[in-house]
Amino acid sequence: EADIYQTPRYLVIGTGKKITLECSQTMGHDKMYWYQQDPGMELHLIHYSYGVNSTEKGDLSSESTVSRIRTEHFPLTLESARPSHTSQYLCASSESGKGYGYTFGSGTRLTVV
Amino acid sequence: TQLLEQSPQFLSIQEGENLTVYCNSSSVFSSLQWYRQEPGEGPVLLVTVVTGGEVKKLKRLTFQFGDARKDSSLHITAAQPGDTGLYLCAGPRTTDSWGKLQFGAGTQVVVTP
């Protein structure tokens, strides 16, 4: 049973559209993350959050934005989607402190046409 | 960035055979984690190794952390089709006080009946 939920699972949209990828977790974890995953490439961190009202950009330059108004909710928004945004987006959460493993959602496969 | 190099990139074997995948770095990690990702799903944490030289077993999977804590291996005995997936190693970045994880690119394992 998943403790972290991502919706939608698949999304095909046209260039220029605004989209929001949803991510919610029920574990009470303070830390949440958004990763981008492309075939044969390592996971790239695009956003992370240490807690409510705390968000930071990750390593990979991204035109997306995130918010953390509630502990359990960490949505990612693309104001104007482009074909270069086509990718798999993974949301994850973890307990505070070092060395804890991540719990990942099932991901959103985004295709921008 | 502390790079984690995984090898091989792809491995195809028949059911019943053994396999080993590797995760190497030039940097020391305080711990390493292994995840398995099945098609269409997010990665799932398999194990965390913490002590240099540590060996952990999870049914038919054996994980080893190198003495110098720069490398790790995953050995699967008598592989089954259910072992098919992308195996990722990850370790906390020592330059990051919050312990964000650095991921390798993964080894794609395919076990055919």
Image: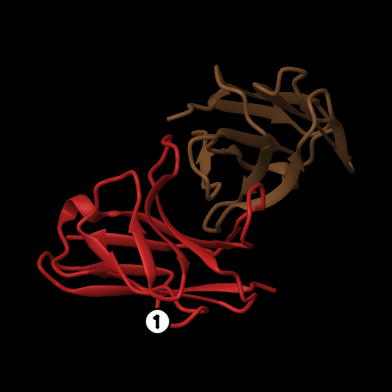
Chain colours: A red, B brown
Residue A4: x %, y % from top left: 57, 72
Give the residue type at disc 1: Ile
Mark 1 belongs to chain: A
B90 sits left or right of A8 in the view = right
Q: Is residue A46 left or right of residue A81?
A: right
Q: With respect to residue A109, does B94 lie above or below?
A: above
**Front-most of B50 and A106?**
B50
Q: x, y percentage for residue A89?
A: 39, 58
The residue positioned 43% from the left and 34% from the top of the image is A40
Label 1: how many Cα within 10 Å (few below 14, some 14–19, many 20+): few
Secondary structure of residue under mark 1: loop
**Which quadrant of the figure has residue A54?**
bottom left
Q: In the image as oriented, which residue stretches furthest toward the left?
A: A16
Q: From the viewer's perspective, is A99 left or right of A105?
A: right
Name the quadrant of the N terminus of chain B: top left
Residue at which label 1 appears: A69
Residue at 86% across, 36% down = B56
Give the left or right position of residue A90, taking residue A110 as reference: right
Indicate whether A44 appears above or below A2.
above
Classify residue B18 by image quadrant.
Answer: top right
Quadrant location of residue B53?
Answer: top right
Quarter holding the C terminus of chain B is top right
Residue sitting at x 52%, y 47%: B100
Q: Position of residue A90 (x, y in %)?
A: 45, 58
